[in-house]
Image (tube, rainbow, N blue to C red):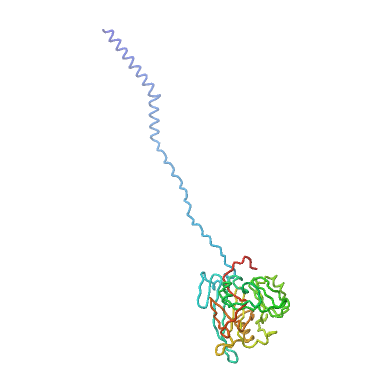
Amino acid sequence: MRRRKRLAVNLLLQLLVTGVLLIGFALPHHVIPRMRAKAKAAAVTPAPAPAPTPVPTPETVEPEETAAPDTRTEWQKKFAEHFTDEVVVTENSYTSPNVSISIEKKEYVAPNGQLSVYFVADIYVGSIDCFSSSLLHDELTYYAVAPIAECAAEVNAICAINGDFTCYQDFDGYAVTFRKGQLYRRGDYSTYQVCALFNDGTMETYFPGEYKLDELMERGLWQIWHFGPLLINADGTANTRYDWQDGIAYQNPRTAVGYYEPGHYCYVVVDGRQDNYSAGMRFSELSELMIEMGCRCAYNLDGGGSAQMYFDGRIVSSPSNGNPRSLGDILYVCEPTGREEIG
């Protein structure tokens, strides 16, 4: 019995000794190093993570509005104050983006005291095809005529005056007819003073022998009128040379076309042969009037019963004898015709 107890005690002691040895080995080699590592890790405060660098937000840039291209002609720009964005029509005026017409009725008292009434149409155009002239039915037919309203309706004319009555000038080699850039009759041997309008808008007048038709055409001839006389000389003075027209130089109803600069023109119609209303003008008086108006160039067209001004569907002047003569051609103002090439 005692022996068993002794053996149990010895076994227990051996187990205790073994346990102490194991603990003594584990503490310095495993437990204590781990505890120290944990304590060290706990003692170190982790540095805060750096804040992300903000990416700059690009400023919102409004796209620039692209200006609409300016499609106006040089004349539309130059005379912009005379044109309007929309068509505006009054009793005596018409304006649009392309055309400006204003008509005034005026009086002239001659040195002998006689009164004359005349009408002036002040005209600005955006392109040369708005300032034109035409033959009835676009044909040169001897004495083919119609009232001015019918002639105007054919070409959508806003304002018109009688032309040079070229259909009556039926002489081969004598009368020249040139309209809208087209030659109808040469007239190489004409003794008339003529007026030429070019595609660049310039207007010039010539005495016989001072021009050659082919040279005018090479320069870009747009219209030529063959009646006369010319009213203003190249030096700005009044013309006093009337050639064969001396016999009609006294007071008569008159029609004239005037030129200020390219794109700016005028029509003048003088009523006449009407007692107690209007006597008419002499060539010399008409020349002086055109000079006073500031024209650089002016030309007399057919007169008498032909002299008449049309505007917006009616005749605004008072033709002689109260019965306007039918016409074969007119000068007129219209909206652009859409010609592809000018000049």
21 up-or-down from 77: above or below:
above
Q: Residue furthest bottom?
A: 112
Quadrant assignment for the N terminus: top left
Q: Nearest the camera: 126 or 64?
A: 126
Residue plotted at (50% across, 76% down): 90
Judge whether residue 311 can be spotted in this image.
yes
Q: Nearest the camera: 220 or 327?
A: 327
Q: Nearest the camera: 14 or 188?
A: 188
Q: Position of residue 76 (x, y in %)?
A: 57, 70
Q: Residue furthest left?
A: 1
Q: Position of residue 290 (x, y in %)?
A: 61, 82
Q: Dividing the picture into quarters, in which one does residue 333 lie?
A: bottom right
Quadrant assignment for the C terminus: bottom right
99 up-or-down from 236: above or below:
above
Q: Position of residue 316 (x, y in %)?
A: 54, 80
Judge whether residue 133 can be spotted in this image.
no
Does residue 159 appear to the left or right of 224 in the view shown? Answer: left
Q: Nearest the camera: 64 or 180?
A: 180
Q: Position of residue 14 (x, y in %)?
A: 33, 14
64 up-or-down from 79: above or below:
above
Does residue 320 appear to the left or right of 18 in the view shown? Answer: right
Q: Dividing the picture into quarters, in which one does residue 283 lie?
A: bottom right
